[in-house]
Amino acid sequence: MLKIYYGDLDSENYIFNPDAFFNNTYEDEWITDSFSVEMIKDIDKSDVIAPGVIDSPFLGTIPVERLSRGVKTLILMNNDSEHIFNASACGDNCAKWILKIAEKKDLTIRLGYLMDFGKDNLNIEIVNLWKTVHDGIELVESVLDNHLI
């Protein structure tokens, strides 16, 4: 299940800057995992050549550290269950991947904006409110009505 904390978060296991955290903690197998390969292709339009080598149509051959903040954050979410990551490092193009990760495991993230998760068939807990919402309208209304961001 996806759990979202909106607004400022003060927690020992919260990672505000997932980009820097990723660069210092990722493991090679995280990059070559088929799920990561799919996310990298979709979000960054790039191909994984080897654990440390990515082929980007925009930048050429790049090291893993040059992937986008969004895809790095997604890879962390998928592989690190001990931390809460700042999903504000992600754009709306990451929303479907966050939902896919949350289908596989409980996932708690922090957001400082209203990410577009779509309109229908959601099962998202707003941690600040201890409330589960089931569609995009209910999510937006709950966040805005309670001044969470």
Image: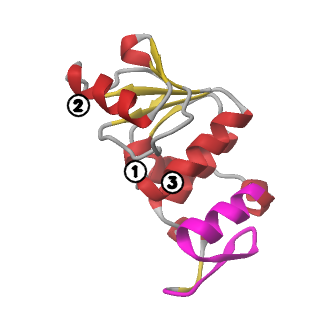
Q: Kindly indicate the quadrant of the structure image that contains residue 146.
A: top left
Hey, which quadrant is residue 103 in on the image?
A: top right
Nearer the camera: disc 1 or disc 3: 3
Q: Is mark 1 on a helix, strand or loop?
A: helix
Q: Which of marks 3 and 2 is nearer the N terminus?
A: 3
Q: Is residue 53 magenta?
A: yes
Rendered view: 32 above or below 11: below
Mark 1 to mark 2 CA distance (whole Å): 16 Å
Image spot of residue 138 (x, y percent)? 38, 27
Q: What residue type is labelled 2?
A: Ile
The amino acid type of the residue labelled 3 equals Cys
Q: In this view, does 49 lie to the left or right of 108?
A: right
* 149 w.r.t. 57: above or below: above
Q: Which residue is drawn at 60% across and 50% down?
A: 97
**Residue topped by disc 2:** 149
Front tag of 1 and 2: 2
Q: How many labels does the image show?
A: 3
Magenta stretch in the rendered image: 35-58
